[in-house]
Image (cartoon, grey):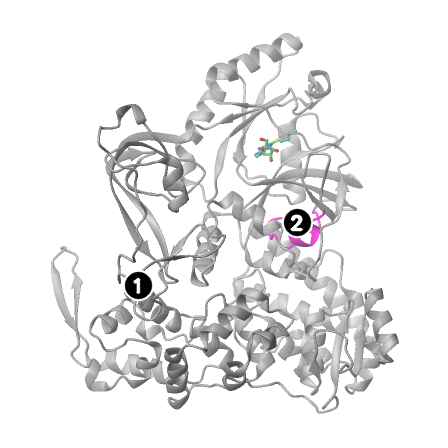
């Protein structure tokens, strides 16, 4: 048996095994392997597929990490229109719904009550048991083809189990963002100065519309299916749900058959309270006639079926007094108004504060100190003020004027064109901004100095020992030894704790070790606005050193393909500031890495300039890296400087024309491999993998995302 036969077998084996593991995890809620073992097998499969791209199976679990970005989603007509549901907010209306139906048919029937997931609806088509297409609802008649994105959702089966599914069928459900993913996403967004999503629904819908599936994979979406379309062999909707579960779909298992209205009400009451404990948002429950043979008889209105209705939970709302408005300054200088309320019970929790978002919202609501205000807790996780009871307003109150100066440092606030938020521009002197920068610097994905965690940074800042990130590297033993910290004991009493030898050694050891972090991390750690991990890597790779990056002007930054207007502006502006330049100089003197360590496998392309276009057996990004591994330089567009165009399938006709006109040789993928001395070596593949691990890290919790050397796994057989 030759290598490729062995690879074929192993690829099938791994794809099937991992599909089974996924199913055990997501559908049966019964994991059978550790995350670590799962990751190893997935990695092995990925490596094999990279080496033998034609052997990748259509249901391969590696698609979970996301494929090539798409420019525009294809619009596709739904075979069956995606209807909506009629809403009700009261039991009376539910009773009317029941009476209406019982008049339309003599048949006895019961209901199925389900959760009404608060996300966005999706329609999945399976052919021969393999996920073939995923469409958004769109306008109900046609939606966007988001297949590549949906494939990254781990709870959506790429291949079904059992064998009794129709050859081709559609199933519909809801894509949601679980609370944990939502919090993590917003934390990351705030870290790089992006506006956080208001609620998980917006976050889910924003995520599904991203053009890069690898990014979607990181959003950790979830999907519940609740509606099998067409004739599937089961008469009852509840049987269809059971069947769907057996085929591998996540149906949630929260539904219940209800024989009468009393049982329906009990289900509503139960979930109205219990929804607080769910790991995702629901906004009501859906009541469906269980006997699907009655559905055609009961029919549809223009917008919704008559056999189902949605009971929407009322957003919990209370009236309370607005005592004051205070302002929080975040790490990026964003100023957020917060309402301080007379404490009031809302949905089981005591609420004392509510979000007011920004100056525009305050003006629109015309809230005034002392007003009685309505506070609501709806889909949003944080309660918000939704209105004022003007009839109870006291005479003599005044419209609230937004603050003009930073409450922390007194600097005049600024408001950027087209943005609703106010910012404190005093990045260098505003305490919460400085503390934020220090914390970002030591964080795990930056310099990873965990010995400085747990409030130690704040203490060092408070004692005046650290004022900027370069100060960490000047800390001496005697600065830290016996440093006192006040902590609250279990009894609530405050105690003094002083740093002992071991703590000090730990801190200094951690700081010293951080000097080994690669340049791209240093670049991320110094906290340039909008420069996240991926951007730092792009910049490090492109410019090669801090010196070159600092010397680059706006135009040179814009030449980098992935760098847009905003980042080019913030980066060039950052390095014009003398304070930042001084910090970089001190970090350099302290011995941090300021040069990008290039992976160089050969010099076969030394001195040549390349443009890559079209699709290849590996991602375009990986092809570009291969050019660089062999000494070539990447250019963003075809010009007289271009020596070669590396062309994959579907290369843009415009580009081809231009290359031909300029007389630039067009090289195919196979020819390219010849130029670099054969198909990529295992070393190259490993570097490609480890290098892209932070940008398109798999959906699986990786034990060490930054590890560069792959542990030996069975696939090495083919090396
Ligand atoms: S059934 C033909 N079941 O609510 C009706 N919808 O307001 C098919 N939704 O567009 C929908 N949970 O996006 C159904 N258990 C559930 C649901 C559900 C959430 C969404 C769905 C629908 C919207 C209608």
What residue did someone put label 2 on?
A: 157
User: Residue at 14% across / 55% down in the picture?
Assistant: 492
Q: Quadrant location of residue 554?
A: bottom right
From what the image shows, is residue 51 above or below residue 630?
A: above
Q: Which residues are magenta?
A: 145-161
Tell me residue 141's x, y (percent). Answer: 73, 34
The secondary structure making up most of the magenta span is loop
**Where 246 falls versus 574 (above or below)?**
above
Horizontal relation, residue 441 to residue 221: left or right: left
Q: Is residue 394 left or right of residue 603?
A: left
* Closest to the observer, 555 or 283: 555
Vertical order, 449 against 146 (above or below): below
Q: Which structural element holds mark 2?
A: loop
| Badge number at residue 432 | 1
Residue 385 place in picture, x, y as percent: 36, 37
- Quadrant that contains the C terminus: bottom right
Camera-side residue: 188 or 385?
Answer: 385
Whether the residue under disc 2 has CB within 8 Å of ligand 1: no
- Can I make out residue 708 in this image? no
Which label was assigned to residue 357? none
């Amino acid at each position: 048996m030759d290598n490729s036969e062995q690879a074929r077998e192993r690829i099938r084996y791994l794809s099937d095994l991992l599909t089974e593991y996924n199913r055990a995890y997501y559908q049966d809620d019964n994991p059978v392997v550790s995350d670590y073992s799962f990751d190893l097998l997935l990695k092995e499969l990925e490596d094999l597929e990279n080496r033998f791209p034609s052997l990748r199976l259509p249901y391969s679990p590696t698609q979970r990490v996301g494929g090539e970005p798409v420019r525009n989603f294809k619009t596709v007509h739904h075979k069956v229109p995606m209807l909506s549901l009629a809403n009700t907010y009261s039991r009376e209306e539910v009773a009317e719904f029941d009476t209406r139906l019982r008049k339309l048919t003599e048949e006895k029937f019961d209901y199925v009550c389900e959760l009404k997931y608060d996300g966005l609806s999706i329609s999945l088509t399976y052919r021969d048991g393999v996920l073939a297409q995923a469409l958004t609802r769109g306008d109900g008649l046609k939606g966007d083809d988001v297949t590549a994105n949906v494939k990254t959702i781990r709870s959506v089966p790429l291949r079904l189990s059992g064998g009794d599914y129709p050859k081709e069928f559609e199933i519909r459900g809801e894509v949601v963002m679980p609370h944990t993913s939502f919090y993590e996403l917003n934390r990351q967004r705030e870290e790089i100065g992006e506006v956080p999503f208001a609620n998980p629904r917006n976050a889910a819908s924003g995520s599904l519309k991203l053009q890069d599936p690898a990014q979607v994979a990181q959003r950790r979406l979830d999907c519940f299916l609740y509606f099998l379309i067409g004739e599937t062999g089961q008469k009852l909707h509840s049987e269809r749900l059971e069947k769907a579960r057996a085929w591998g779909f996540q149906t949630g298992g929260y539904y219940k058959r209800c024989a009468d209205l009393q049982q329906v009400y009990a289900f509503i009451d139960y979930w109205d309270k219990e929804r607080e404990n769910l790991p995702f948002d629901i906004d009501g429950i859906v009541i469906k006639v269980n006997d699907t043979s009655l559905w055609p008889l009961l029919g549809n209105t223009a917008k919704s079926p008559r056999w189902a209705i949605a009971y929407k939970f009322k957003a919990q709302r209370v009236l309370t007094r607005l005592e004051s408005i205070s302002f929080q300054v975040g790490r990026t200088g964003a100023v957020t108004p917060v309402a301080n309320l007379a404490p009031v019970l809302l949905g089981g929790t005591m609420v004392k504060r509510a979000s007011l978002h920004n100056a525009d919202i305050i003006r629109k609501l015309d809230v005034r100190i002392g007003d009685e205000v309505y506070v609501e807790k709806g889909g949003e996780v944080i309660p918000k003020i939704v209105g004022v009871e003007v009839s109870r307003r006291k005479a003599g109150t005044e419209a609230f004027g937004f603050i003009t100066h930073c409450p922390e440092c007194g600097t005049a606030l600024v408001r950027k064109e087209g943005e609703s938020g106010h910012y404190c521009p005093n990045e260098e002197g505003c305490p919460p901004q400085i503390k934020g920068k220090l914390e970002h610097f030591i964080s795990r994905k930056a310099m990873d100095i965990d010995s400085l965690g747990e409030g130690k940074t704040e203490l060092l800042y408070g004692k005046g020992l650290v004022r900027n990130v370069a100060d960490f590297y000047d800390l001496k033993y005697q600065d830290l030894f016996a440093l006192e910290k006040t902590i609250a004991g279990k009894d609530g009493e405050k105690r003094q704790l002083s740093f002992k030898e071991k703590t000090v050694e730990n801190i200094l050891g951690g700081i010293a070790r951080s000097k080994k972090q690669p340049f791209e991390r240093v670049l991320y750690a110094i906290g340039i606005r909008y420069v996240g991990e991926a951007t730092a890597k792009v910049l490090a790779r492109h410019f090669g050193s801090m010196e070159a990056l600092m010397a680059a002007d706006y135009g040179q930054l814009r030449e980098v393909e992935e760098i847009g207007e905003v980042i080019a502006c913030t980066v060039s502006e950052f390095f014009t500031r003398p304070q930042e330049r001084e910090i970089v100089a001190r970090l350099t003197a302290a011995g941090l890495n300021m040069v990008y360590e290039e992976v160089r496998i050969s010099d076969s392309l030394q001195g040549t300039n390349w443009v890559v276009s079209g699709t290849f057996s590996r991602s375009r990004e990986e092809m570009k890296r291969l050019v660089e591994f062999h000494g070539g330089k990447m250019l963003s567009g075809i010009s007289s400087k271009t020596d070669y165009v590396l062309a994959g399938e579907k290369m843009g006709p415009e580009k081809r024309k231009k290359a031909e006109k300029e007389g630039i040789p067009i090289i195919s993928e196979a020819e390219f491999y010849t130029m670099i001395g054969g198909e990529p070596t295992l070393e190259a593949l490993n570097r490609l993998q480890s290098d892209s691990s932070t940008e398109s890290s798999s959906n699986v919790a990786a034990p060490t995302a930054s590890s560069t050397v792959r542990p030996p796994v069975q696939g090495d057989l083919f090396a």
